[in-house]
Amino acid sequence: MYGEDFGMDITGISNGYISEMGVYPYPQIGEFDINEYSGWMYTIDEGAGWYFPNVGASAKALTKDTEMIWHFTMAYGADIGAPWAFPEEKLPEVKLPDNTGELLWPVDSYEVTLWFGSIDEQYPVENKGLNIQGEVNSNVFSVCDGIVSYTGYSPVYGNIIYVNYNYNGKPMQVRYGHLTDETSLNVGDRINKGDIIGRMAKDDERDKGIIEIVFCKSTDGKICKNTGENVEFVEPIDYIEKKPVYSDYLSEPFATMLDTTGLAISEVTPNIIWPWEDESDPDVRYREDLDLESNEGYLKKLLIEYGTDIGKKYTEKTLKNENVLEYMDQYKVAIVHMNSRSEFYGHLYRNGVIKNNRMVVDKE
């Protein structure tokens, strides 16, 4: 959407942002990013009782309870985690439930497609929340005990829910986006940690569901406003559970660490150290195949791969339970029992070394 589309004169302006409020022929508000040639605008006819965003959406009836929603976009209109915002409102004085300890992970999936913070050095913006993909229509759970402060619809985020709560006595707000169907929740409803509040909507780019969850803390000690004027966006991982890593989806075609909507600069390998992990942890380094020479492999992983080749679905657990792999810790020796034979590996046999508490052998 170009500047002249809504009456903005950008002659001689090479970069930056400009805003506009005017009448053409109805009251309009808008903002335009000259760098990216994108922006937003609303046209309002108060007499007729409707408004619509100038992005091809249909008109929507206005009532005294209707709040106008706007969303600023960049990168040719792609959703890159900009916040939702609403008109000024007066929140009722309520006693918010207090939460302590780790809050709940919001879905069953652990496939994080976009983390909080800087997206890439080429994008001068930050993602305000945490994006997770999973099965379409899978449940979204309340991460905390709280009180619903807003439910509504965004042309970009679909159905959205805001929940206010206290954390260690301090006001916070959590926002859920990309929910399917309109929720049965109402403003003022109290919800409990673990309650199902919605379901994952389908990502238009893939056959996957998607959820974005945003955490905010109050900057003035008062209840967080839906307008965002007294909130600061914070790192979700500082509050929610640290779930087991699942990165297999990153090896799928077109999967990226950045996201799954086409904004990523390049594909990545599935070797990832997640924000809550210690890179020096031997378990992490084992999982990511760190510290290995090109000809080396972890014995346990090589056996699992070999099992696949011969039609055996080995796991770390079945290797032990079926006595395929046995360790003699006192001698730092591993014994493989397979095909009616036993093979010994270790420094004593000059065919294995210990790295990250695991036996490493030559791949051949």
Image: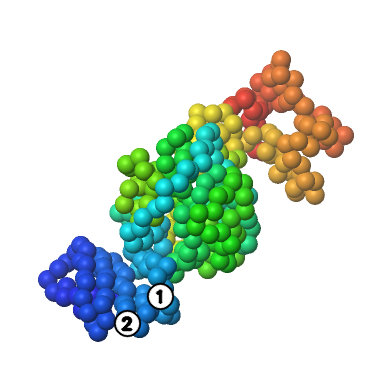
Does the rendering let one see residue 227? yes
If the image is split into quadrants, where does the N terminus sit?
bottom left
- Residue 192 x %, y %: 59, 46
Q: Residues within 10 Å of mark 1 (few under 14, many from 20)?
A: some
Q: Amino acid at mark 2?
A: Gly
Residue 26 position, x and y percent, is 27, 81
In the rendered structure, the answer to whether residue 10 lies left or right of residue 119 reads: left
Dot 2: within a 10 Å radius of its alpha carbon, few (fewer than 14), some, or many (20 or more) residues?
Answer: few
Residue 110 is left or right of residue 19, and the answer is right
Q: Nearer the viewer, residue 292 or 60?
A: 60
Residue 208: numbered disc:
none
Distance (Cα) linking label 2 and label 1 = 10 Å
Q: Pointer 2: what residue?
A: 47
Residue at 35% across / 53% down in the picture? 228
Residue located at (78% from left, 32% from top): 320
Q: Quadrant of the C terminus?
A: top right
Residue ID at (77%, 27%): 326
Q: How is the image coloured?
A: rainbow
Which mark, by number, is residue 62?
1
